[in-house]
Image: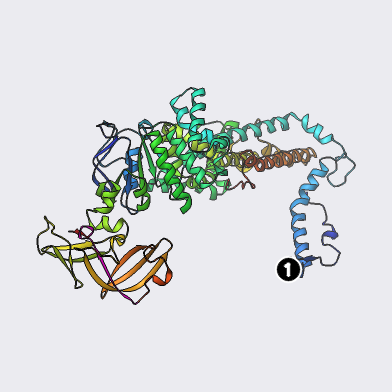
Amino acid sequence: MTLLRLPSATAPSRPAARTRTRRGRTERRPRVLVAVTALFFALLYLPIAVVTLFSFNSKKSLTVFGGFSLRWYRAFVHDDVLVSSLGASLRISLVAMSGSVVLGAALALGLVRCRTRLGSLAGLIMLVPLITPEIVTGVASMLLFKGVGVDLSTGTVMLAEITFSISYVTVILRSRIAALNPEVEEAAMDLGATRWQAVRLVTLPALLPAVLASAVLIFALVFDDFVLAYFTTGVDPQPLSVRIYSAIRFGVQPTINAVGTLMLAGSIALIALALFIPRLFGRRGGLDILSGE
Amino acid sequence: MDATPAVRLDGVSKQFADSYAVHRLDLDIESGHFYSLLGPSGCGKTTTLRMIGGFSDPTDGSVLLAGADVTALPPNRRNVNTVFQSYALFDHLDIAGNVAFGLRRKGVAKAEIRRRVGDMLELVQLGGLADRRPGTLSGGQRQRVALARALVNRPAVLLLDEPLAALDLKLRRQMQVELKQIQREVGITFVFVTHDQDEALTMSDRIAVMNDGRIEQSGTPEDVYEHPASRFVASFMGTSNLMTGTYRDGEVALDSGPALPVGARPGISDGTSVSVSVRPEKVWLSDFEPGMSVLSGVIRETVYSGPTTTYLIEVAPGVTLSVLEQNTARARMEDRWSGGETVEFGWRPEHCLVLV
């Protein structure tokens, strides 16, 4: 789909910019750095920009822009198979997000609190899914479901996605839990809370920003996951990523551009949400999605 | 006075791996007292406090609160509250929410919670900060919140784990006075863990000096300071000019040479190796009385610190005494002694402690 040519105007034609530093000296900003940076962003975002642009194309062509129209969005809305796939993907993402956050948070709490040799072994094994090639986990999951006689469906995708998302949640939350002051939970118990109440009333609220951040991350990862979904999904409905892949095999429809643009908008909304979360908790500074800090 | 001690530890031990953090500790804390556990770090004082609070299970022995055995009870079922060293405030709750936490767990009526939280915040002078978050408060204010959060539950005993350690010196002094006032006002038994002997002396009704998992001595601040029962207590409580020698017939022949008249000490037999201790402020530099031990020595160092001056006087080669004098007698700079001068000094025999 990258049929576009890079515009020759990537490098600025004006003379090297001069910036005044605080000490009053002028420093030359090398032109080549500006050019490399511009090239980097162009390579990164131009394909996406093209998809977005052509999703508004009035023609069926993928190379010639014929004018603005919402034709392909209308086509998407009326394509029952694609819409049901979007629904399936949203359901899968929501279920996988909730399941893996609950299980991952419990695992993280357990790993931090349990300081036996078995506990540190579990902490290492937990990391394996992060480095295993996804194709291996995909095939393994499929073989497992076949082996125990479970028919592949949206449900099996959910199970597989939960299983392999737990590690991400645990990695994010474990460092946060380790950084918590253990005296805070003791203080809650000192003030009359049972062990479980102390976790619910004190520890979890303290972890909430990191929990929400990991939830957003898992949702995004699962929503556009292809490999695992491809191996574990049933026939109808298929997750959106699998559906698009199948559709492309029979020739690319511009409807895909519209779907891609909608997914992009959704991702941007999620990231904005993740950045907004810390403000809800009265924290200054942004939120690092990966560390939850 | 209530005959049943508020806290009783009965042969309590805590063993970690193969060493004892606390070893067969017996302890009675009288109801309404300000009781300090004083000792260097690692002496077992915090472990003792955690066993009273229920955060640490004794390996042996029992913990009694107001006569009832609570050894097997978790913290939430003991009528004690704790002020933690880190304050351990709940950052996601405002100040009022922090203070109300314990009352909510007990299911106290909302109107009463509001009233008691309000009263308590007044008591610790945080009346206007009820809706602030802990993160926006200063160290001193956070300390008060931690205190209010514990006291509002009206525990039988309040446990304080070095609560002033994180404050700067001036604030610490101020909080010492305030804590003592609050304790008198509420009449609750305070068990206070500290490594700062000044703090323990100024605030406590009783002090237990701990070392190596055991209590070396317990008593009133005056007892512990004036009549230390061991070399450890004498050296841990302030400066003490410890010298070693041999007791014989009312005198101690110091290993370094001179003999000090110390008065007859029944209970110490002749020929016993002893340590002699004289507090720096008990040494006189002039106006000696009859019966005093008077020695002479050379001033090696003069340390001026405002109201007082400390002289380091060499008595014999390698033996130096520290002498503290109010800057009253020699108020003017030119009257004070300087290094190299030979001076006479002495003390009353009863101020000279002989420790076996």
Closest to the observer: B92 or B305?
B305
Q: Amino acid at mark 1?
A: Arg
Q: Residue at x 45, y 34 (%)?
A: A198
Q: Is B34 located above or below residue A91 in the figure?
A: below
Q: Residue at x 46, y 36 (%)?
A: B148
A150 horizontally vs A15: left or right: left
A160 horizontally vs B238: left or right: right
Circle 1 sits on which residue? A23
Q: Quadrant of residue B242?
A: bottom left
- Boundaries of the magenta span: B340-351
Res B17 visible: no
Closest to the observer: A145 or B96?
B96
Residue B348 magenta-highlighted: yes
A75 horizontally vs A220: left or right: right
Closest to the observer: B320 or B236?
B320
Instruction: Single out the residue that lies furthest toward the bottom.
Output: B340
Q: Quadrant of residue B240?
A: bottom left
Classify mark 1: residues with Cα within 10 Å, few (<14), some (14-19) or many (20+).
few
Residue B139 magenta-highlighted: no
- Label 1 marks a residue whose chain is A
Residue A205 is situated, as x and y percent measured from the top left of the image, at 53, 37
Q: Residue at x 46, y 24 (%)?
A: B108
